[in-house]
Image (cartoon, rainbow, N blue to C red):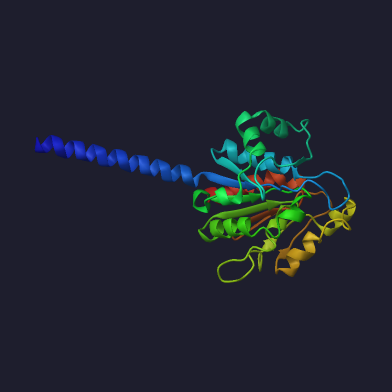
Amino acid sequence: MKTIYLILSTILLFSCGTKQSNKTENMKKKILFVVTSHAEKGTTGEPTGFYLSEVSHPWYTLYNAGYEIDFVSPKGGEAPIDGFNLKDSINSIFWKNEIYRTKIANTLKPSEIDPANYIAIHYAGGHGTMWDFPDNKEIASIASSIYEKNGFVSAVCHGPAGLVNIKLSDGSYLVDGKKVNAFTNEEEIAAKANEIVPFLLEDKLIERGAIFEKSGVWESHVVADQRLITGQNPASALEVGKTLLREIENQ
């Protein structure tokens, strides 16, 4: 009987350990995407929102690598969409995925997020971010928590608007002293939005101490520095996802 008891105890311990290991592994595989709740460019009446390819392209790479994606927005609920182009094959794949189409239509509120569940956070762009990302302290706190627990932060195009006010526990700005990329001043002028947006993203990041890198207008450019991955524009979105995946897998 004693032998049987020892065998059963060993099996139980192994089973519990395996379940706990699987649970921990699943938690590590989750990535949080941040999208805007803001639907208008200033007072122009022109609609905006998150740029679809800046969600779908990184999602495509990470999802196919086995990562689960959750979505959060400043207000929660349905997020406004810009750049809705289903001729883009990856946009189409994302939009036809019922699970993720439902998730993006029912984004979580910041208060519903536990940063401990995520290995990375990704800020998608779209002009709407310029109005509701910078001063959202709840999402900034989530990002700094993920980063300071050895996680990753990525952002593309106007998504880095969410980075400009993130501070770490030592009081320094997240971007201070790091190579960073985002929608450039030249691109804002080309988009005829330089006098509409509340600030120029390139200038604000430099003001926060970032080492700003850029390529020509609409050219793909991605930079990774100290677990921070940033991309310049929509053309950079797929590479941001690939770079984030590579950085996570190589950690």
Identify the residue at image location x=51%, y=58%: 150
**Furthest residue in direction bottom, as rendered:** 171
Splitting the image into 4 quarters, where does residue 197 fall? bottom right
Visible residue check, residue 198:
yes
The residue closer to the viewer here, 123 or 230, is 123
Left or right: 42, with 134 as reference point: right
Q: Quadrant of residue 18?
A: top left
Residue 132 drawn above or below residue 86 = below
Q: Image quadrant for the N terminus?
A: top left
The one nearer the camera, 181 or 54, is 54
The percent coordinates of residue 115 (x first, y second) are 53, 53
Q: Is residue 227 visible?
A: no
In the image, is 9 to the left or to the right of 168? Answer: left
- In this rendering, position of residue 159 left or right of residue 147: right
Horizontal arrangement in the rendering, residue 23 relative to residue 204 (left or right): left
* Residue 148 position in % (x across, y down): 53, 61
Residue at image point 26% right, 42% down:
13
Q: Position of residue 28 (x, y in %)?
A: 48, 47
Q: Give how far across and how far down residue 163 sits, in percent.
A: 67, 59
230 or 20, which lies in front?
A: 20
